[in-house]
Image (spheres, grey):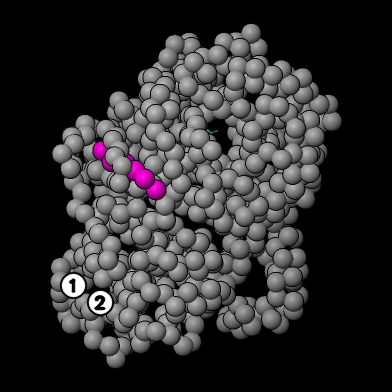
Amino acid sequence: MNRSLGVCYYPEHWPEAQWAEDAARMVDHGITRVRIGEFGWSRLEPHPGEMRFEWLDRAMEVLGAAGLGVILGTPTTTPPRWMLDRHPDMLAVDAEGRVRGFGSRRHYCFSHPGYRHEAERITAKLADRYGRHAHLIAWQTDNEYGCHDTVLSYSAAARDGFRRWLADRYGSIEALNAAWGNVFWSMEYQRFDQIDLPNLTVTEPNPAHVMAFRRYSSDMVALFNCAQVKLIRQASDAPILHNYMGRVLEFDHFETGADLDIAAWDSYPIGFLSDRLDAPTEHKARYVRQGDPDFQAFHHDLYRAVGQGRWWVMEQQPGPVNWAPWNPAPLPGMVRLWTWEAFAHGAETVSYFRWRQAPFAQEQMHAGLLRPDSAPAPGLAEAAQVAREVADLPEVPEARAPIALVFDYASAWAWDTQPQGADFTYFDLVFDWYRTARELGLSIDVVNARDGTIGDYSVVLIPGLATLPDALLDALDQFQGTALIGPRSGAKTEEMAIPVPLPPALAGLDVTVSAVESLPPGIKVPLADGGAFHRWLEHLDTSLAPRERTCDGAPACVTHGALSYVAGWPDAAARTRMLRRACETAGVTTQDLPEGLRLREDGRHCFALNYGPEPVTWRGRTLEPAGVTWWDI
Ligand code: GAL
């Protein structure tokens, strides 16, 4: 498959007379794909059962005739208002027990059987009508599962579904009581129908109860998606994708993604920097018009794993967004840089959101490739430039990266459920290690913790993995490279209890975590070789001579053979040293990149991207801010 550019288009927002000209302009600018339909339900079915496909037929025809391949979205993220008359209890309920109302989007509870049925009904109708359409190239299910905090719902439908799910998982109420430790505080149940959702308790609910609800809620997303996928496959051979969002961890994307052909995600670098990243003010100021230099790359690598190699950017920020606390414009060149970065990480398609800025409703302040008056916005020329450049660069198969980062959604839920320190956040811990690897010039693969596929990697990072799955333990037993494990890896059972023998319980490494502490902001435990632990500190029992110690002489990092255990949350200096040493041991070359410069290798090229606001020189080439270059390796 060739690299291609796409755009998100809403024919229902514009007069029909404008469609052909829009389509022709897209093609003129090198865009070959267009996504439509994902919010169109109220126009497809204005009244229950009254289908109006004709406008979509004509839109598909006009777009396709211009040479565009169409990605058709199922509109289930925006059920029309009449749906609530049919299913008044289909809305999600927040943790405080408030119903989340109509008037925006994603207003449904994944557990509601009536709404699930409606979502299947509209999906089947679309699949039947367009499944073999000449211009259809892919399907998108729904839109951004989990966005706007929509995975966890405390509705009656969720409660009923959860009870059934529990009965299925545990078999007997005695087994559930034992697994959760319900003897504590006399929380034992006699029947599954006594179990409520873990909200509105007097003090914190049992973490095992919370984790079970998190697993259930994640399963509901996968089921909702899978139902659509099955119906589409009956009527269509086109690949099916979903557009995931940045830093949404409330459902297991690997599970949902297992039913799909492609993983796509929606990349809004400047919005994310302002809205979704825990970073110092100076960092946010430095990258205010570029986005964080690692946030997009991390998600590219994560979604490459979720898509088992096949992934797209379904929505690429083209200019200022509307939804972050502040919404600056990208530095000239950044739209091009973001697009090239995605291709460097193996994206098949990068599609901009959206074609024309809408002058009405919630996103009227969100840029498009065109202004509301149809004049070009700054992103358009950059997209067109990439289209020309892409045509000249041969595509090569992805190469395996030398280093792997093991990722696990359930660990994010575990440390959310029981952080023990207010800033112990799985994403931040993982992302810290990812950033350090990038600063050392490395290309990284993310791997699913449940697969245990670490065999051929030279270096493997396993921070904060709450439960070490059997497949991964087996893989670690055979592992020939260098694995950096911890902190908190293997610290919980699947049922959110402390395992005995105590963690990490690795066959090849005589280390026991005997005690743990969380450290408030500003408190550091300095390490003898430089840098410090912050946020989290573990005390280790070991017969091995530590590879690193704290300044007090306690073990900070213990190594034996392929395995190293890290007894805390290292700051940047400590992480850099530990990772550089792991790479040296494993024969992986690291580099010290100038600030803001990032590298990424595919099977044949090395791409260099300058996120920094000043020019950098690297290997005799000078890159201006937002500069991108590549060479053969
Ligand atoms: C995405 C969403 C789009 C649009 C966009 C604005 O999260 O999928 O429909 O709302 O954000 O940035």
Identify the residue at horizontal 71%, vertical 27% (top origin).
134
Residue 205 at least partly seen = no
Figure quadrant of the N terminus: top right
Location of residue 458 (image quadrant): bottom left
* Amino acid at the residue labelled 1: Leu
The residue lying furthest to the bottom in this view is 543
- Which residue is more in the foreground, 618 or 121? 618
Identify the residue at horizontal 50%, vertical 69% (top origin).
452
Category of crowding for the residue at label 1, using alpha-carbon neighbours closer than 10 angstroms: few (below 14), some (14–19), many (at least 20): many
- Which residue is more in the foreground, 415 or 559? 559
Category of crowding for the residue at label 2, using alpha-carbon neighbours closer than 10 angstroms: few (below 14), some (14–19), many (at least 20): many
- Residue 250, relative to residue 195: is it above or below? above
- Residue 448, relative to residue 266: is it above or below? below
In this picture, which residue range is highlighted in magenta? 603-610
The residue lying furthest to the top in this view is 17
* Amino acid at the residue labelled 2: Ala
Q: Which mark is residue 556?
A: 2
Instruction: Please tell me whether mark 1 sits on a helix, a strand or a loop.
Output: loop
Identify the residue at horizontal 66%, vertical 80% (top origin).
177
